[in-house]
Image: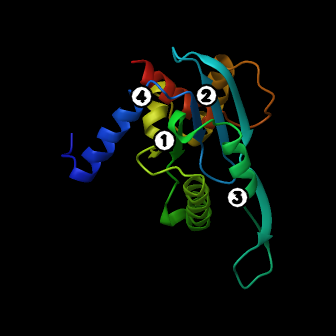
Amino acid sequence: MPKQTKKEQSRIANWYDIISNNKVRHIVGIDNGVTGTIGLLHLSERLTVLQYGIVKTPTMYTDAISKKRVKTKRIEPLLLEAIISSNMNTLDDTVVLLERPLLNPRMFWTSISAAKSMEVTQTVLEMLGFKINLNYFVIDSRDWQSVLLPGVKGSDNLKVESWRIGTQLFPNNSLKHTDMDGLLIAEWLRKEMCK
């Protein structure tokens, strides 16, 4: 295992403080990007799920920043703020997990979209009063996928398994979407808190 930097050790210490915080009653899991989902868990004192939900990340079309006149999809910040703020009581009882975006030079436009989405989402969280590594965390997809989707490889397979596992764990949902990543991200943290 590689040696951790002091910054990483501090982040992990804060992470475990949050996980061991018995006041957490709301978890928001955000699958980053314009095609992502937002998973919402409301928990009892014993960390059982009282209520859950999943919504598509709110988006809008705007003119692209390019020489050609084309429309591009981006996150709608006011609706994102409304979704998050309506699913929390206080900053003390809510934790947000935000999945790190894909950044790959071979997928330039996808990476640009993911980075823009990340920036909008982090700005909304910070406007709501969330603080990085205090009550919202950026996680890698491997963190939650290794626990909830073990051994699954390939983007298409991950989406299929995400839907299958998500609908098994949370059968009463009305979202017709290709994956349940946002909800599984939130469930992963709940499982970590129960350890």
State which tag comes first along the sequence, 2 or 1.
Answer: 1
Give the labeled residue for mark 4: 21
Q: Which label sits in the foreground, 2 or 1? A: 1
Q: Residue at x 58, y 52 (%)?
A: 125
N-term-proximal mark, 4 vs 1: 4
Task: Judge from the rendering whether residue 175 lies leftward or rightward of residue 48; answer left or right.
Answer: right
Please state the horizontal and vertical placement of residue 8, each as a whole percent of the image. Answer: 28, 48
At 78% from the left and 70% from the top, the residue drawn is 62
Q: Which residue is mark 1?
A: 141
Q: Secondary structure at mark 3?
A: helix
- Image coordinates for residue 56, horizontal then vertical, percent: 74, 43
Give the crowd class for mark 1: few <14, some 14-19, many >=20 residues within 10 Å.
some
The earlier-in-sequence mark between 1 and 3 is 3
Does 43 appear above or below 69?
above
Label 2 and label 1: CA atoms lie apart by 14 Å
Question: Considering the image in quadrants, where does the C terminus appear?
Answer: top left
Which numbered disc flags the more N-terminal residue, 3 or 2?
Answer: 3
The amino acid sitting under disc 2 is: Glu
- The mark nearer the N terminus, 2 or 4, is 4
Across and down, in percent, residue 95 comes to: 52, 38
Describe the element under mark 2 as helix, strand or loop.
helix
For the question of whether residue 5 can be seen, the reply is no
Few, some or many residues within 10 Å of mark 3 (<14, 14–19, 20+): some
Q: Position of residue 1 (x, y in %)?
A: 21, 39
Q: Nearer the viewer, mark 1 or mark 3?
A: 3
Work out how far the residue at label 4 is from the one at label 1, CA to CA, in angstroms. 23 Å
Q: Quadrant of residue 48?
A: top right
Q: Which is nearer the N-term, disc 3 or disc 4?
A: 4
Instruction: Give me the disc on residue 77.
Output: 3
